[in-house]
Amino acid sequence: MEPVCTHLDQVKIMDTDIQVCEECVKAGDTWVHLRLCLVCGKVGCCDDSKNRHATGHFKGTGHPLIRSIEPGETWAWCFVDEVELETEEEEERT
């Protein structure tokens, strides 16, 4: 049986104009890739980044859904159900 996400009803935000990890900027650090919380819109750095702010946001808030906001990347992730999701952009191409 294929894993499913049981948190899609929590999606409130799908896009952002923010193109920095604000916590890394405040700390004077850099990041590798950016992730958007689909519940509240917070942008954080990925787990390949030194500070892992996106995962830290999930651990601190319980907001389960993020998506990549990197150019050319169209995936989302549910931390709780540990499943990758298709975004609308990806569904439109199939």
Image (tube, helix red, strand yellow):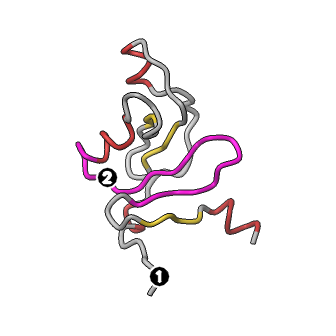
Residue ID at (23%, 42%): 60
Circle 1 sits on which residue?
A: 2
Closest to the observer, 39 or 52: 52
In the rendered image, residue 73 lying in the magenta stretch gets the answer: yes
Q: Which amino acid does label 1 sit on?
A: Glu
What segment is highlighted magenta in the picture? 59-78
For numbered disc 2, what is the local secondary structure? loop
In the rendered image, residue 46 lying in the magenta stretch gets the answer: no
Circle 2 sits on which residue?
A: 63
Asked whether, in this view, residue 63 is left or right of residue 74, the answer is left
For numbered disc 1, what is the local secondary structure? loop
Q: Which amino acid does label 2 sit on?
A: His
Q: Quadrant of residue 69?
A: top right
Asked whether, in this view, residue 89 is left or right of residue 12, the answer is right
Residue 46 spot, x, y in % from top left: 46, 39
Residue ID at (31%, 47%): 58
Label 2 or label 1, whichever comes before in sequence order: 1
Asked whether, in this view, residue 70 is left or right of residue 47, the answer is right
Residue 62 spot, x, y in % from top left: 26, 52
Residue ID at (45%, 32%): 49
